[in-house]
Image: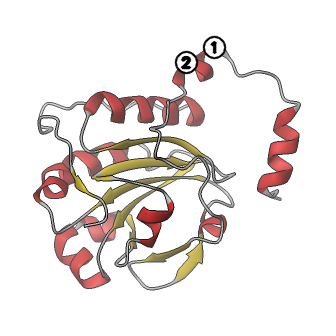
Amino acid sequence: MGCTADEYRRSAAGAAPPSPERAAARVTLPGAMVTEAPGDLPLQTLAGPEASLDQWLTTFHLVLVVLDPYTAESAWLLPSATRILRVYDEADCRVALLMTCDADDARSFLGPYATEFLTFVDPDRNVVKALDVERLPALVHLRQDRSVAGSAEGWHPKEWRAVTEGLSAAMSWSRPVIPGPRDPAPFEGSPALG
């Protein structure tokens, strides 16, 4: 049985301090990134059903790779992003692609990845705005209490590695190799709001 974010915070307040490994795995969030996502934020899947962020976080953390299919930057990173998400396919987290477009454009851009990964569509970029993401592509790790455990914007392998190290520590899971041998060179990304 789950608990609310407030119940979680109250129970965690009396918890023991984190182990040195977990403390070292924490990621510093950029100044603009929110620290807690709104629970009523609607997420619409590629197939159509919509559910709130709270509903998606009931059982597992949520790890989003946010892509803009109308930019070269997101296209350059698509193979690398999906390689990274595959590492966590069977971990105790949901991995997903968040596309800043409608369902038809998402399917066209993603090709076979559209059926391999849970995919959300955000044509009005409301989710991007709610998370205060400024550059795409982006990687965002949300805990079950809606707090942002880590995020990276643009393609800066060291930042993406820091987020995945925190996720791996939280999940007691293996880490992806970042950067991989076929990953693109670092780049700033495109503006998240278009």
Q: Residue at x 16, y 40 (%)?
A: 187
Name the image quarter holding the C terminus: bottom left
x%, y% of residue 161? 36, 30
x%, y% of residue 1? 83, 59
Instruction: From this view, report whether residue 24 is shown above or below residue 153.
Output: above
**Gap between marks 1 and 2, in whole Å?**
6 Å
Identify the residue at the far top of this view: 20
In this rendering, does residue 111 appear at all?
no
According to the picture, the residue beneath numbered tag 1 turns out to be 20
Instruction: From this view, report whether residue 84 is shown above or below residue 103.
Output: above
> Which quarter of the picture shows residue 14?
top right
According to the picture, the residue beneath numbered tag 2 turns out to be 24
Q: Amino acid at mark 2?
A: Ala
x%, y% of residue 91? 52, 44
In this rendering, does residue 68 appear at all?
yes
**SS category of the residue bearing label 2:** helix
Q: Residue at x 35, y 32 (%)?
A: 159
Most foreground residue, 96 or 122: 122
**Does the residue at mark 1 contact the one at mark 2 (Cβ under 8 Å)?**
yes
Q: Amino acid at mark 1?
A: Pro
